[in-house]
Image (spheres, coloured by chain):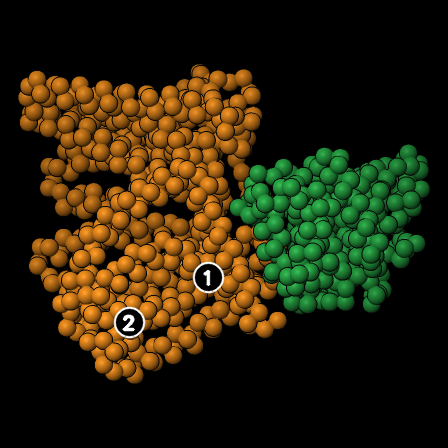
Amino acid sequence: MPSANTDAAIQATGLRKVYGSAVALDDVSLSIPSGTVYGFLGPNGAGKTTTMRILTGLTRPTDGSVRIAGTDVRDRRALAPRVGYLPETPPLYDEFSAREQLDYVADLRDIPQSTAQERIERYLSEFELREDADKRIDAYSKGMKQKTAFVQAVLHEPDVLFLDEPTAGLDPRAARRIRESIAAFADEGTTVFLSTHILPVVEAVADEVGVLFDGRVVAEGTPAELRERAEGEGGSLEDAFLAVTSGGAEGLGSGETVESTAGASASPAAPDASNDSR
Amino acid sequence: MSAGGDLRHGLRIARAELSRSIRGYGRDWRRLVGIAFAVLFLGGYLLVSLPAAYAVGRRTGSIEAIPFLGAGTSLLPVGLVGLAALRTLERIGRPPAEDLLLLTTHPRAVVLGLIGAELGRLAVWFGVPIVALVTAFGFGLGAPTVIPALGLVALPLFACSAVWGYTLGIGLLRAFRRLPTIRRLLKIGGIGGFVVLTFGSQLAGGLIAERSIQASGLLDAVSIRPLVSYVSLAFVGTPLADSVSLAGLGVLAALIALTPVGVVAATQQASALWFTDTSVTAEPSETKTGGERLAAPRPFSVVKSGRIAWGHLLRAVRKPQEFTHLILLVFFLGPVGTTVVQAADDALGPLVAGIGVGLGTYLAGATFGLNPLGDDRPHLPFLLLSGTGVRTIVRGRALAGVALGLPVAAALPAASVVLGTHLLHAAVFAAVGAGTVVAAAAFGLGLGAAYPIYEEREFWGTETVVPSTLVMLVFLAIVGGGTLIALLGTWVTLTGGLGLSPLVVGAAVVYLALTAGGPYLSYRYAVRRYRRYHLE
């Protein structure tokens, strides 16, 4: 288990989530420094969304604690201005236009009106939404909805940004726009927690990668480190992912805590324990 | 953030939710037509009622003399709490765009916003007629000040009732989540309660009429004096009241004190509900989905539409909660039930046979037919590209309805023989039932296809698409009326009360033509709607 890092943007310790007798998360600990883009990988049903919901305070863990930018996630009032969250299904109101939606969110976030208007116009232009900004969202394409939801998540310029499959189903142009924005936010010091199945996106933008399997973090490191350790399997991030999610972490020869060059750390499960929880 | 900040956010959320609702009404022209019908229908009543309210205002010499004030004032908060709890169970137990709102603002603001939006919707639906009636009454009284005064008095009462109704609803949702068995029992109990309430009200009405009980005495019995005193505050300064009552002020103080307490309780309950995942049972419940049951048995397996019908029936058995809309029939069973209870011995058998025909006909049309496009929507891309003809798909739905309704329409007349129905009569009733069942199954499909509802709604914790209430009512009116005519005609013919005059034959021909032609055209329309679905 990593030691508590008071400077970490995301500090999760001993997270466990149990539904009945089914263990969704088991002793997940994360320590992610500010400004890191953290790629969070895992097969379907591994517990990625549960982890994200716990990290954003939307779901209570059975055990363990989370601090985001130094704030306990149970303190919702303090947490709200620090985090932005783009869930897999964009939380938008079909009856609103993009501009109305963003105005509404800015109002609820108490962003001063002049600042909000400046940001809204800037983001609408950057994401090529300006021409359609006054059309109702129910007429938008998937990509337009996703971009609107992305803007909504970053409008208050949060310290930590949680993105759940932000580029899934997008055309290359829209996907690239989102990827560039993720990199830009990270450059400005925002910590990005990126959950996705699209490995090239992770390879392109992530500083650190964590792999969740059967409710446990089974591997963690930079993309280069994971690739390097999967050389026997072919050497790509996909090979590394398949190796750790098919038979635990032994495929990478790990089993010990991985300390990455960027400083993020997790507690990977012992290889033979990764399947025990289900 | 302060309570004031949450209140401001709550008002913003309420405004947004209300705006979404109004835009939602305007988005669908069919819904607008439904609303226009409702406005025309109720507007007529309102126009007739306004002079009456004015006349009451002119004649009234005391608060006690205002008709129904005591009972109305006392029943209003109870009704509002019940309504708010039901709306919470059905619609607003979780906020829309939940992830967004809960990460943007405090749950207390969300609770305030959802309750505020409900009050706003109530005002949109009922505000105009109520204000019109109160205005007419106020001008009749010669004291227009009563109009804003009643508004001021109503606000705390409505707010307090809505807040506690929401708290009750959220509390029930939490209880349902923790104890799913309670939910199932309450559903059964709720249906039973509706039946008892409907039968009870019919019996009570009969008793009141028989024994000449004065309704005013009953109404006085349910009046709560302090609440009447509270509403009387609105009349201070008018010819009806000249002083402020202490009891009225006490109720006002209680309402003002209880409302924030309710908000605190609702926020605690809502936070616990929203930030806790649905508990999952240790092992997935045993579902009988073996291949042997998926294979349609005879006679369903003979034709493709039969196999499709079997699929619908399997779905119905495995997820019966998708058919909650069928409960509407309970309201119409009340009078029939009372008639059964009061029926003479020799009439009981035919009555049961008739009920069987009516029930079977209802099930045949209403179970699978009243929202076919909405129900099929997730599968339409597959269905329409599957190579199966649209007619077969639509026929499959109709067959599923027939397969459900026909046994009921045949079995109850057969069983009524035990209660004294002549065997031949029972057979004729069953034959009539077979005809109305087929007609209803076909008619329901066209009617439902004309006004599809695609949005899933959470009803008592289950996400499902249910037919439009307007469609249900039209179906009940047309099919119910048609079936009743068929049953009465059959009964009168069987008992020899109807000779074969040209008029009777002509009426029978017209009836049969309508019963066959209407459903056929309706079925054709449903097929057309499926074919043109991709054009929408």
Q: Which residue is tagged 2?
A: B145
Q: Judge the density around disc 1: few (<14), some (14-19), many (≥20) Cα neighbours within 10 Å.
A: many
Q: Give the residue number, with chain letter if any, for mark 1.
A: B116
For residue B74, which quarter of the picture?
Answer: bottom left
Relative depth, front residue between B510 and A93: A93
Would you identify the image quadrant in which residue B1 lies?
bottom right
Chain identifier of the orange chain: B
Camera-nearest residue between B26 and B178: B26
Local SS, label 2: loop
| Chain for disc number 1 | B
Q: Is residue B436 left or right of residue A26?
A: left
Chain ID for label 2? B
Label 1 residue SS: helix
Type of residue at label 1? Gly
Q: Specify whether B251 is left or right of A192.
A: left
What kind of residue is marked 2? Thr
